[in-house]
Image (spheres, grey):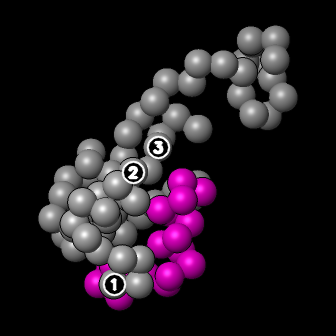
Amino acid sequence: MSIIVNLDVMMAKRKKGLTELANEVDITLANLSILKNNKAKAVRFTTLEAVCKALSCQPGDILEYVEDTGPSDKGDTDGDCG
């Protein structure tokens, strides 16, 4: 995955727990945990906005682009895209 979610880092910096943040953002604990553990496939802008507001941060503080350096996890080992 090329987008890394650093929510756990920002939560630690702000000293906010998962339950507290989930309540502030009005998201289920399970869904926030999925986002925090980098398992989410997508995030709504409204959710990202609420998280940024609750943590007093910018989206770039939470999301990071990292270029893939090797074959994907989907079995593509020959380097082509097809």
Mark 3 → mark 2, Cα distance in angstroms: 6 Å
Name the amino acid type tagged 2. Answer: Asn
Magenta-colored span? 21-39
Q: Residues within 10 Å of mark 2 (few under 14, many from 20)?
A: some
Estimate the x, y position of residue 35 in percent, counting from the top left.
Answer: 50, 63
Name the amino acid type tagged 3. Answer: Ile
Residue 4 marker:
3
Please indicate, yes or no, whether residue 61 appears anywhere in the rendered image: yes
Mark closer to the chain start, 2 or 1? 2
Q: Classify 34 as above or below 66.
A: below
Q: Which residue is mark 2?
A: 6
Mark closer to the chain start, 3 or 1? 3
Residue 49 marker:
none
Q: Which residue is mark 1?
A: 20
At a point 38% along the width and 58% down the height, the residue shown is 7
At a point 47% along the width and 62% down the height, the residue shown is 36
CB under 8 Å between discs 2 and 1: no
- Label 1 sits on a secondary structure element that is helix
Q: Looking at the rendering, in which quadrant would you find the N terminus?
A: top right
CB under 8 Å between discs 3 and 2: yes
In the picture, measured across the screen, residue 43 lies left or right of residue 56, that is right
Mark 3 → mark 1, Cα distance in angstroms: 22 Å
Extreme-left residue of the structure: 56
> In which image quadrant can residue 70 be found?
top right
Please indicate, yes or no, whether residue 49 appears anywhere in the rendered image: no
- Foreground of the two, 11 or 73: 11
Q: Looking at the rendering, in which quadrant would you find the C terminus?
A: top right
> In which image quadrant can residue 34 be found?
bottom right
In the picture, measured across the screen, residue 41 lies left or right of residue 64, that is right
Instruction: Tell me, yes or no, whether the highlighted magenta stretch contains residue 65.
Output: no
